[in-house]
Structures are given as structure tokens and as C-alpha cells.
Image: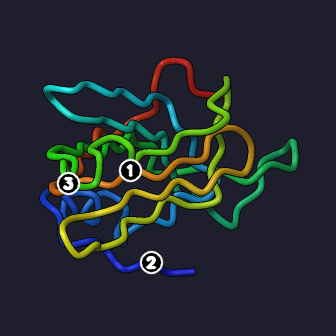
Amino acid sequence: MVFEAPDIPGAQEVIAWFGYWPTFHDAEVLSISLDRRSGCRVSIFAFEMTPEVDSQGRYVLAKHAVVTFSMEDFPADDGGMSNTRIESFNRQNALSSAIVNKQPHGFELLLEGVYGVGASIVCERMSVSVVPGAPRDAP
């Protein structure tokens, strides 16, 4: 499955790292931060699953990175953060996908969980950044 890159600041840097816009399948949500002044941050440990298999029968992963979505200006006329839903955050938080949907007055970040967190966050402004490399506590 190929997802189209969202039209947000930083998306081209994510594409430059991965070579495409990732689906975030099997990626792991590391943190979700909500702050009434500075907005919301969602950090995801993402990687590319290669067709190669290691000696233990696991797929070899490449292009490890932490991708962080930053969201601000939550729609006040719609109740602000009432447009935010976060469920089942736990120790792993594996995703089926992370999708950025364009909305009439901004964007929605939709985290489709497989194990752990599922979320929907609606905002007026969104950007994304990528930091190559795995987090210290990555498996």
C-alpha cells in the first residue's frame, strides 16, 4: 500500500529519508504530548521492512527513524481538544498505519492501532520532522 505524502511542512524531509511517504505499518508510537499552549506532539518509531530475513527468521529492518508530528491551533468553534480521541496507550503501541487527512479547516492525524494506541487528532496546522536512527530503547 502506498500513501500519498501530506502537504505539510517537513513532509519532503521524511520522503528524502525513506525514499517515499511511509505507511507506518508496524511502526510504534513512542509518545503523545498534549499541551494547551504549544499543541500536540506524536513521536513514532518508523522503519522500512525489507524482504530479507535474518538467521532467526525475522524481517530485516532498515531506515530507522523517529518521525514526529506537531499539531497546533485546535478548532475552537468545535470545542478545541474535543476533536481529539486517544485510546489504549500502553507499552508497545504498534500501528497498522498513520494517516494524515486533509480537513476543511486543517488536518487530522489518524493512528490506526494494531496493539495499543489508536487515536484521531484534528488541528488547523500540522508539520512533521524526522530524526534518523532508532531510539535508545528500540527492540
Mark identifier at residue 23: none
Most extreme residue toward the right, as rendered? 56
Corner quadrant of residue 50 = bottom right
C-alpha separation, residue under disc 3 versus residue under disc 1: 11 Å
User: Which of the two discs, 3 and 1, labels the residue nearer the N terminus?
Assistant: 3
At 52% from the left and 58% from the top, the residue drawn is 24
Element on which disc 2 rests = loop
Q: In this rendering, is residue 47 above or below 99?
A: above
Amino acid type for the residue under numbered disc 2? Phe
Which one is nearer the viewer's eye here, 71 or 80? 80
Q: Which of marks 2 and 3 is in front?
A: 3
Mark identifier at residue 77: 3
| Residue that label 2 marks | 3
Mark identifier at residue 83: 1
Q: Which of marks 3 and 1 is in front?
A: 3
Element on which disc 1 rests = helix
